[in-house]
Amino acid sequence: MSSQPPPRKQIVRMRVNGRWREDAVADHALLVDYLRETAGLTGTKTGCDGGECGACAVLVDGVAVPSCITLAARCDGHSVETIEGMAQGGRLHRLQKAFHEQLGAQCGFCTPGMIMAAEALLRKNPKPTEAEIRSALSGNLCRCTGYVKIVKAVQIAAEAGS
């Protein structure tokens, strides 16, 4: 038998994809686990578990963050956006559409994180250069592509937003 006490929990209130939620979360719970297990939003992927691959990127108050190294409790009172919140009214978001049309997804594992990082960029800079796109996506690893189609998809989405 373990003599360790159960993990402490706290009530966390955050706006997830536009809707406020309140949930009891363990103090050590990671945002990626909260999103997948508590909120049931499985589009956010766990890749490296160390904040190095970008597969788990979500937006917290509009900034792309690695949810695998972000404590859920740190998001109390904040807005969190996941890939599931991108499509509106059954219509793909311009980035989702561009990734699909430009074949920017191969296996698709990195795609949610890529799209969230690209969305953070386009909100800050609606007309980025190729170098700015590559820089914004530099924290997101893809093992299937050479990034050419991914960069092209972001460029097409940027043009569609103009």
Image (cartoon, rainbow, N blue to C red):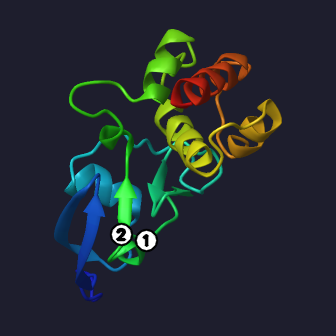
Q: Which mark is residue 29?
A: 2
User: What is the distance, in whole Å, between disc 2 and disc 1 at their CAs?
Assistant: 6 Å
Q: Which residue is mark 1?
A: 71
Looking at the image, residue 41 sits to the left or right of residue 160; the answer is: left
Q: Are marks 2 and 1 in contact (CB under 8 Å)?
A: yes
Residue 109 in sight here:
no
As shown in the figure, which amino acid type bears the numbered disc 2? Ala
Q: Which mark is residue 44?
A: none
Front-lying residue, 162 or 17:
162
Residue 32 screen position, x and y as percent: 39, 55
Local SS, label 2: loop
Query: Which residue is at a point 47% across and 15% down the rendered structure image?
Result: 100
Looking at the image, residue 10 sits to the left or right of residue 54; the answer is: left
Q: Please state the total of marks drawn on the protein image.
A: 2
Local SS, label 1: loop
Residue 88 screen position, x and y as percent: 27, 34
- Residue that protrudes farthest toward the front in the picture: 162
In what quadrant of the picture does the N terminus appear?
Answer: bottom left
Residue 10 screen position, x and y as percent: 24, 83
Lower position in the chain sequence, tag 2 or tag 1: 2
In what quadrant of the picture does the C terminus appear?
Answer: top right
Looking at the image, residue 27 sits to the left or right of residue 130; the answer is: left
Query: Which residue is at a point 24% across and 74% down the rendered structure image?
Result: 13
